[in-house]
Image (cartoon, coloured by chain):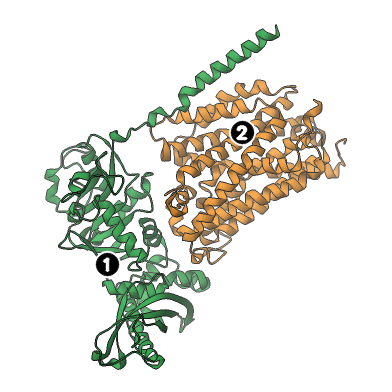
Chain colours: A orange, B green
Amino acid sequence: MKDERQITAIQSAAILVSTIIGVGVLALPLFAVRAAESGAPLVTAVSVLLAFVGLAVISLLGMRFPKQSITQYSEDIIGKWLGRLGSALLIGYFAILSALTAREFGEVVITSVLTRTPLEVTVIVMLLLAALATRNSVTTFAYIHHFYFPLLLFPALLIVALSLKNADGLNLQPMWGNVSWTRPELWEGLLTITALFQGSFIMTLVIPAMRRPEKALTASAWGMLIAGGLYVTIVAATVGVFGSEEIKNLLWPTLELAKGTSLPANVLERLDAAFLAVWVTAVFTTLFSSYFFTIKEASKLFRLGDHKMFSFFLLPTVYVMAMLPRSILHMYEIIENVGRIGLILTIGYPMLLWMIALVRRKRGNR
Amino acid sequence: MMFAAQFAKTIKLLIVIGMVVPVLTGCWDRLEIEERAVVLGISVDLEKPGAAKEESDVSHLKGAFPVPNQRMLRVAVQIALPGRIPLGPGEGGGGKGGSEGTVWVIDVVGHTLDDALMNLQQQVSGRLFFGHLRVIVVSEALARHGLQNLNDYLRRNPEVRRMAWMMVSKGSALEVMRAAPELERVPSLYLMSTLDNAVRLGKFPVNYVGMFWSNTSKKGQEAFLPYVEIRKEQNIQVQGMAIFTYDKMVGSTLPFDIAAYMGIKGLNPAGYRGFVPIGNNPSRTVTIYATSRKSMIKASIRNGKPYFKVSIFTEISMEEKISEQFSINSSDILKEIEDTNRKALKKACENLIEKTQKAHSDIFGFGEYVRAKLPNYWNKKVITKGAWQEMYPNVDVEVTVNTRMRRVGMKAK
């Protein structure tokens, strides 16, 4: 296809931001506070840096092979079969990630808003929506993200800004928390939060469609800065308002923050409904990206010209996986563990590829 | 051919949309307003174990409740009657005891809050809806017994908002729920506006249930709630603060102590009046009120113990003078008033701090200053909430007050 190189650097940054901001934002302050109490914003910031390292490697690889995505260049770098194995693992991992996103979405909705709607329905609706949307080209994919990007960012910033009037700076001190930075919980939490940024892996798929792939690293930096900045701000606001000990009692502190925040002059007494509307969009864009990655890369792995066939073909598998966790707590255990293990795939594996590519002087044709 | 393909595509799309639409409507959670029982207020009292006889077997069989202690709760709810609540000031026309017409107060007993509410649901047709819950009244006896169960249920319920007010009533909480003040047609809203206006007038620090929960959780701070009493005109008086350790009430303060509390925390607006006898001569007394306050709390370590320096600055104005024997006409006399007020406020603050120290309840959050500003000390010597409660009575707090008297009203002498 000739016209597939249309995505601008700004659009790729928008894709990154709206992909990263997703279902995890609700539980994020809880993960961060469990790791480091009042040091939660700092832990989040460190996680952003860690996630950026992974994203930078992806961008550098993409700039080295500007016409290919990871499924294709991995075969060049480490050989056909090893590369295929790696790609298959990645595809499977993103299918699991999509399933968990849909399930977490369903759990939030059934607990807080639509308590009597069956979980199956919310999950299926979300998956159907994502599956329908993935039947488009990469360019349309970029347009959809670009369209939703401001709708996600500005309401979220507004809620954070409004909630700050209830915040107490004392809750954010000491900055590194009253915990030792060598304890295992802290490292687990750090990795769990880093795992929330894994959606940024979508960059590998965006670069071959970018008009100027050499700008990929800049776009990645901006995307990570905006999404990471928002995450750190949300954590800081939540900890500032509730204090770290209270957050340990809340399953979704960010939702509670929206619940306790009101628009000035009695326009809206609680913002959780508005927040949930934004959040549903955020979940959709995240799910859209991870599902798009799954089917697009699967079609490349099987050397298919068109990815549309997979969009509904994979749906039942993803749905069944989404239904596997037995309870909400079981689901979060799975999300945390799977996310941490997945970092090997989304940060470790590209890093390995990059180093081998450097050593073997492999380079894609421009 | 082209046309047929286009047509088939349209049909396919229509089928997909047709399949999706019924799922998107969210009909499972449809709840018409007249089908829900909107709970505006809840009161919870402690009951004698004998009250179990009154209970019917709704959520458990008689005698089969697996609770070690035999305490019972009496829960009353105020349910808004749809259509009866006037929307504007012009509507309705009021009449005596107007509240009887707008809400419905029902009380039940139960072993836990949920148990009681389920017993209640059994008698009420509409689904109990807590999205508009504004006021939670707890009797002093229950507060002293502990609020764990209550806090757990309310935190868990997604409908309850953190902006509701929770208060402790002197005596029966049910009576507060049954009270029908004349001013507002919805009693719960009257209760709520009593407290909201107290905040606006500077009579009480803002303290929604969410803030109460946060303060309960904090390691270096204890929570407090408004302590209210019902007066003879069915009105509610804020009687001070009910102070807690963990979730158990351990004492109460006088209304005037609230002023000292707000002074120490530097909270505005300032709403309390103070009597100042100039030069300790009771016949030369003036009433002053504070217009704004600032405070700074500094924590340090002295002799291996935390040491706090509280500096309070208040701006005051004069409101009345008790006799014509003396006149207020020079800035020197204002200086004298400042001086006396400084001593009086310092004394009030020190008294309140001492009172809370005796109760092991650090409602000011001095411990949070240690945790935040002196983390090395905290991590070595304190660490837990319990340890801070033990340490709090032994710490030294030095209060310094600075006052400026600015205005004297419209009278020249």
Q: Which residue is mark 1?
A: B250
Residue type at the position of mark 2: Phe
From the top left corner, tell me how far across and down residue A35 is, in percent: 53, 55
Residue shown at the point (32%, 68%) measured from the top left: B203
Label 2 chain ID: A
- Kindly indicate whether the residues beneath marks 2 and 1 are on one polypeptide chain: no
From the top left corner, tell me how far across and down residue B129 is, in percent: 31, 41
Q: Is residue B401 left or right of residue A1?
A: left
Name above or below for residue B217 compared with residue A266: below
Nearer to us: label 2 or label 1: 2
From the top left corner, tell me how far across and down residue B3 is, in percent: 67, 9
Q: Quadrant of residue A81?
A: top right
Q: Is residue B89 left or right of residue B378?
A: left
* Quadrant including the N terminus of chain A: top right
Label 1 chain ID: B
Secondary structure beneath dot 2 equals helix
Pointer 2 and pointer 1: residues touching (CB < 8 Å)? no
Name above or below for residue B403 compared with residue B267: below
Q: Is residue B100 left or right of residue B277?
A: left
Name above or below for residue B256 compared with residue B236: below
Residue shown at the point (55%, 53%) measured from the top left: A234
Residue shown at the point (15%, 62%) measured from the top left: B232
Mark pair 2, 1: CA separation:
54 Å
* Quadrant including the C terminus of chain A: top right
Using the image, tell me which numbered label, if any, was put on residue A144.
Answer: none
Q: Quadrant of residue B322?
A: bottom left
Q: Which residue is mark 2?
A: A288
Crowd tier of the residue under label 2, counting other residues whose Cα lies within 10 Å: few below 14, some 14–19, many 20 or above: many
Residue type at the position of mark 1: Val
From the top left corner, tell me how far across and down residue B264 is, in percent: 40, 75
